[in-house]
Image (spheres, helix red, strand yellow):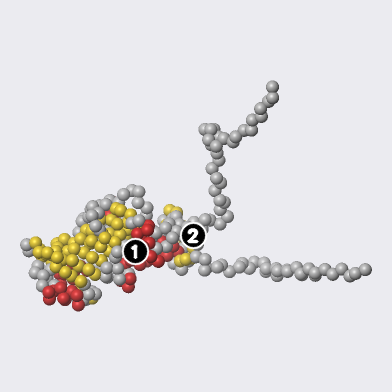
Amino acid sequence: MTDRRETPRPARRTSKPKPQGEKPPKDWSDGERIAKWLARAGVASRRACETMIENGEIAVNGRKLTSPAFKVTGSETITVKGKRVSAPEATRLWRYHKPSGLITTTNDPAGRRTIFDEMPKHLPRVVTVGRLDLTTEGLLLLTNDGELARALELPSNEFPRIYRARAHGKVTPEKLQALADGIEVDGVRYAPIKAELERETGTNNWIRVELSEGKKREVRRALESVGLDVNRLIRVAYGPFTLDDLHPGAVEEVLASELKAKLGSMIKPSSARPSRGARKPKPPRPDVETGLHKPKRNRTIRKK
């Protein structure tokens, strides 16, 4: 009789019992700061969202936040002033031809008309990339991604802003060179500004102005400092996007392919995540009542 050998079974692994009353630490790596999440959802800029948190206007799962360092994954119920905010969608961008006489803000205490009063109703929640003054017209970019708006505004990213300015006064090479060297007005230092004379029309001149900072009323103040009084200002380009023949008051979305080609890695896909435990939607049932997709019946032929 031969001995029968069997491979020994591995010993069962036993996990140590978890102590009662002790919760596992929360993994904060799977989330992002609430202010950044809200900015990408198009609520407002990150700074504005942080101010809203300090004012107690943001709540997560029914509890008001007190710190902008709180992180979320998108599966929570997030509300702003009691209204639920949807998860950030894929980044979108629009070109808007702002007419003169509108304020670039969501609400004006003086009761003046804002650009959002004139926007088409079908537009989602959007934020502006920078601002244009009351009497300044031309290209204004709109996006549903507050983080993208912030990136386009930062001077470090060097997105040029190009204007056509109609100004009263004598244009000389010395004045243009002073702008190119960078000037200081009322204690504010402006980076070098590229200015070129396009044409003269009587006592007025059309000047092409290119800058990269976009400080408040920069074009008007810079030109006035060299004796050129601006009486009309039109922004014709912002970074790789141009005004072209877009009519005043018109809004046109930039194609997703063009957006990706021009901004590349700055564009982020949708980060909307399904809630935990969410079931997959069931496929639609066949419409039997209307006769669609009726199952075929097997017919049997009786022999006579």
Residue drawn at point x = 32 percent, y = 67 percent: 153
How many residues crowd mark 1 within 10 Å: few (<14), some (14–19), many (20+)?
some
Please tell me whether mark 2 sits on a helix, a strand or a loop: loop
Identity of the residue furthest to the front in this view: 304
The reply, left or right, for residue 78 in relation to residue 177 is right
How many residues crowd mark 2 within 10 Å: few (<14), some (14–19), many (20+)?
many
Residue drawn at point x = 12 percent, y = 76 percent: 174
Residue tagged by mark 2?
74
In the image, residue 184 above or below residue 91:
below
> Which amino acid type corresponds to the residue marked 1 in the rendered image?
Lys
Residue tagged by mark 1?
262
Q: Position of residue 24 (x, y in %)?
A: 61, 68
Residue drawn at point x = 29 percent, y = 64 percent: 240
- CA–CA distance in space, label 2 to label 1: 28 Å
Q: Nearer the viewer, mark 2 or mark 1?
A: 1
> Which amino acid type corresponds to the residue marked 2 in the rendered image?
Gly
